[in-house]
């Protein structure tokens, strides 16, 4: 096993001090290699008409199954946990009425499972040697870094949720207005990949019904996003909000590093078009950052960091004013 890394290792029978063999017992979160097949309950299932991927739910040999949160079959894990290595066990699986594979919905099948091998996650020792694999000198430094990262994640999520809640409330109170065809078209193009990924075709849904359902979702989300973006642009223009250029450089650096990773994997180079797109994305992020900060200030909802920053800026301004006063005297 590589130092500082965790991996699954084979669990084998061991002997205790008395020379007795300690059997291997399957535990939660183990990887188990199994043979299984249905032995009863499938009489009215037309197995030959099932797609290959669905047939694999009825019979397999030498298949690794992870006994984690997402079960391979409904109710399987609790029936395998506690079994011994090389055991053969009858397992009863009751498929729910909304199961993804239609021919199995509502069925009660009895399987025979054979436990061939067991692998278990072996965790590293949490010591200074492990910390060094994470580019820290000690576990104390690693704990401090992890704690800081968790706090930053919590603060960032809070800020994002707050920003969205403010925008949602503003847009909600704006009267209906006409959205230009080009603006709506651009919004559709932005939301379509995400919605298509988040809403796959259902098992019993034909292509026409799926596209109709997906297009309705796309239209609703596109209108919402277009309205939101028009309101945002109006607020920016009316209040003459300028982008936060410190954030612009930060975003641009992050986006550039990400693009370089993509180029390295694909074997391509940077182009003027890529640079222009990165600058545009970074500028948009910097503008939105300034907008959200402006709105939070207007509503008295600054984050803790912004409150501290404003206090520091106030102290600096006071010091400058005092210095100017002394010079004038």
Image: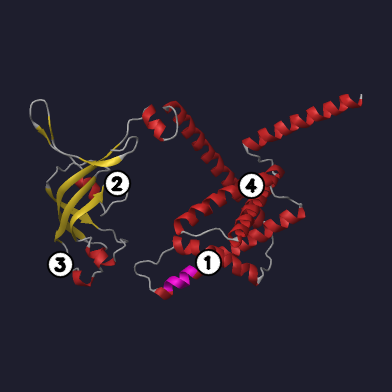
Please give left or right for residue 96 compared with residue 230 in the image.
left
Q: Residue 218 carries which label?
A: 1
Q: Residue 83 carries which label?
A: none
Which mark's residue is nearer the viewer, 1 or 4?
4
Extreme residue toward the right, this view? 329
Q: Mark 4 points at which residue?
A: 249
Image position, residue 180 (x, y; %) = 67, 70
Between the C-alphas of marks 3 and 2, the distance is 30 Å
Choose the circle earlier in sequence order: 3 or 2. Answer: 3
Image depth: mark 3 or mark 4 in front: 4
Is the residue 322 above or below the residue 246 in the image?
A: above
Name the element at disc 3.
loop
Q: Give the residue number, with chain letter if any, for mark 2.
A: 68
Give the mark, 3 or 4, whose residue is nearer the N terminus. Answer: 3
Tell me, yes or no, whether the highlighted magenta stretch contains residue 212: yes
Among the two numbered marks 1 and 2 on one chain, the one whose residue lies closer to the N terminus: 2
**Residue 141 x/y as whole percent:** 46, 28
**Among the two numbered marks 1 and 4 on one chain, the one whose residue lies closer to the N terminus:** 1
**In percent of the image, x 18 and y 41: which residue is there?**
82
Q: Nearer the viewer, mark 3 or mark 2?
A: 2
Which residue is at the front of the view, 63 or 232?
Answer: 63
Q: Which mark is residue 43?
A: 3
Vertical arrangement, residue 258 with respect to residue 154, above or below: below
- Give whichever of 105, 183 is nearer the camera: 183
């Amino acid at each position: 096993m590589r130092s500082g890394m965790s991996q699954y290792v084979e669990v084998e029978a061991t002997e205790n001090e008395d020379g007795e063999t300690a059997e291997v017992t399957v535990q939660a979160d183990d990887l188990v290699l199994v043979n299984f097949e249905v032995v009863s309950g499938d009489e009215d299932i037309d197995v030959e008409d099932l797609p290959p991927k669905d047939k694999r739910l009825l019979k397999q040999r030498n298949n690794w199954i992870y006994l984690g949160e997402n079960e391979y079959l409904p109710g399987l894990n609790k029936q395998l946990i506690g079994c011994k290595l090389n055991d053969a066990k009858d397992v009863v699986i009751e498929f729910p009425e909304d199961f993804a594979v239609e021919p199995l919905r509502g069925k009660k099948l009895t399987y025979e499972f054979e436990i061939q091998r067991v692998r278990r996650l072996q965790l590293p020792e949490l010591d200074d040697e492990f910390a060094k694999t994470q580019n820290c000198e000690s576990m104390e430094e690693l704990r401090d870094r992890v704690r800081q990262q968790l706090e930053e994640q919590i603060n960032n999520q809070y800020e994002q949720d707050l920003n969205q809640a403010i925008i949602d409330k503003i847009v909600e109170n704006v009267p209906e207005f006409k959205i230009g065809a080009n603006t709506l078209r651009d919004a559709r193009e932005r939301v379509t990949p995400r919605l298509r990924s988040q809403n796959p075709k259902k098992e019993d849904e034909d292509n026409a019904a799926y596209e109709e359902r997906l297009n309705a979702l796309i239209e609703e989300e596109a209108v919402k996003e277009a309205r939101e973006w028009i309101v945002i642009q109006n607020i920016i223009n009316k209040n003459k909000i300028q982008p936060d250029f410190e954030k612009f450089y930060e975003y641009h650096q992050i986006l550039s590093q990400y693009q370089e990773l993509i180029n390295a994997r694909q074997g391509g180079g940077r182009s003027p078009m890529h640079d222009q797109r990165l600058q545009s994305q970074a500028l948009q992020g910097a503008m939105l950052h300034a907008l959200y900060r402006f709105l939070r200030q207007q509503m008295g909802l600054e984050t803790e960091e912004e409150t501290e920053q404003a206090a520091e800026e106030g102290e600096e301004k006071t010091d400058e004013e005092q210095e100017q006063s002394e010079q004038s005297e």
